Image: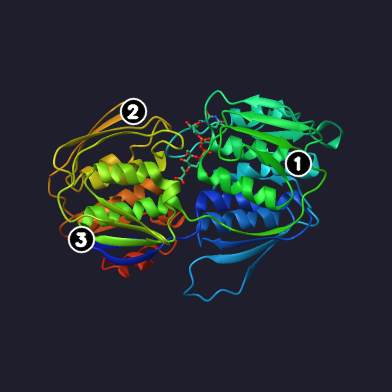
Amino acid sequence: MDRILIRGGHRLAGRLPISGAKNAALTLMPCALLTDEPLTLRNLPRLADVDSFGHLLNQLGASTAIEGTRPEDFGRVMTIRAGKLTSSEAPYDIVRKMRASILVLGPLIGRCGEARVSLPGGCAIGNRPIDLHLKALEAIGAELETTAGYVRASAPGGRLSGGRYRFPVVSVGATENVVMAAVTARGGSVIENAAREPEIVDLCRLLVAMGAAIDGIGTETLTIEGRDRLHGATYAVMPDRIEAGSYACAAAITGGTLELAGARAADMRATLDALVEAGVTVEELADGVRVSADGPLRPITLSTAPFPGFATDMQAQFMAMLLRAEGASVLTETIFENRYMHVPELARMGADVQVSGRTAVVRGGAALAGAPVMATDLRASMSLILAGLAAAGETSVSRVYHLDRGYERLEEKLQAVGADIERVGDG
Ligand code: EPZ
């Protein structure tokens, strides 16, 4: 397994390209199942999760062609052709490796009138149930049964009726699944307390480009008129607001200045506001965001929340950055029950973080020392990279396959702005 070695202490400076958003790509790709015409996605990030999702689509009978991009280019163009599906089953061995596979459930019911999808199971950050996905799909006419670790879904008469559902709590994935199922239902659907993340907006915009009828895009109430069929489209994946926020923390923790090329400030308002509150300078540019920190950072109090609140996917990265603040910060994780796996690893580098339930008190100011640490989940591994960039000496991060799921060519992007970082194979 590969490791990433970092020798910290270098201020980062320069222009860093932001890739297409992982969490948008993983909900845009299954939309190809909703039409027998080609769907071309541009600015697709080169990530392990995107490759896994491509393999799942192939398993269902769709072809996925990567069109000519030079190796040095970031992002790829993929054309997905699902003209003739040969299966409507997502097997356990694929779903267990990538829980986002559950996002084929809605489109398969919408296209084939049936689906059999393995239950995803939990992951490092929580048990990640899918009860809300199932309740929402039932509300628009799906018949579901869960047996032997699989969900079997069907649409009576081969087509969903449409209906109304109000989410008791906000769920990104469940909103995505029910929207993708509702766009080809026989009647209309109203989804209330829908997630409003930018990735949901990207999904709705793609579906409208494919001929869907969706009102209220970006709000918590989505009104959808079912269409008999959708057509193909060409669509560019939105920039990754979490990758951009992660590299903004890299500028802050090293006291440097980074231009995040392609970042969309409107998608990351809560992150940018928190950076400013911590004493970081943020400038919105025509084609991105410039982030610089040339003085001490200030401690802040943060609580994660659904969009437009502070993103749970930014919590671990902010914890690392706040290790450089002069004073105690208080972070509260309200979305997932086990999203502090990075704390014991950061402690190995000298971090002083006390966790009690959902709240972590981060006492900044202590010097960070490089150490061998282990990645446990995607965003936790980024917090270890960030701490390594600021620590004295060498940090070795193992199990970097977690990073490869969500950060395109991370060490290359950081090397280009002055980090002393390299990937080494363990043979
Ligand atoms: C998406 O996960 C993202 N993943 C996550 O990003 C992100 O952390 C999360 O949304 C919240 O923003 C992708 O988009 C692929 P949820 P998702 O359904 O859809 C509970 C990353 O690092 N819940 O909004 O699974 C759930 O347990 C990943 O890029 C139910 O109880 O998140 C959690 O506590 C990590 N029942 C809360 O809702 C359900 O049926 C929010 O989960 C579904 C969710």
Q: How many labels does the image show?
A: 3
Pair 3/1: label in front: 1
Compare marks 3 and 1 and give the one earlier in the sequence.
3
Q: Is the residue marked by circle 3 packed among few (<14), some (14-19), or many (20+) residues within 10 Å?
A: many
Going by the image, does 356 lie left or right of 170? Answer: left
Instruction: Read off the residue under disc 3.
Output: 8
Q: Is the residue marked by circle 1 packed among few (<14), some (14-19), or many (20+) residues within 10 Å?
A: many
Instruction: Read off the residue under disc 1.
Output: 110
Q: Which mark is residue 96?
A: none
Point out residue 19 in the picture as x, y percentages from the top left corner.
47, 60
Point out residue 285 in the picture as x, y percentages from the top left corner.
37, 59
Instruction: Read off the residue under disc 2.
Output: 358
Q: Which amino acid does label 3 sit on?
A: Gly
Residue 170 in the image: above or below residue 6? above
Whole-angstrom CA distance, mark 3 to mark 1, is 50 Å
Q: Which amino acid does label 2 sit on?
A: Arg
Helix, strand or loop at mark 3? loop
**Closest to the observer, 173 or 237:** 237
Compare marks 2 and 3 and give the one earlier in the sequence.
3
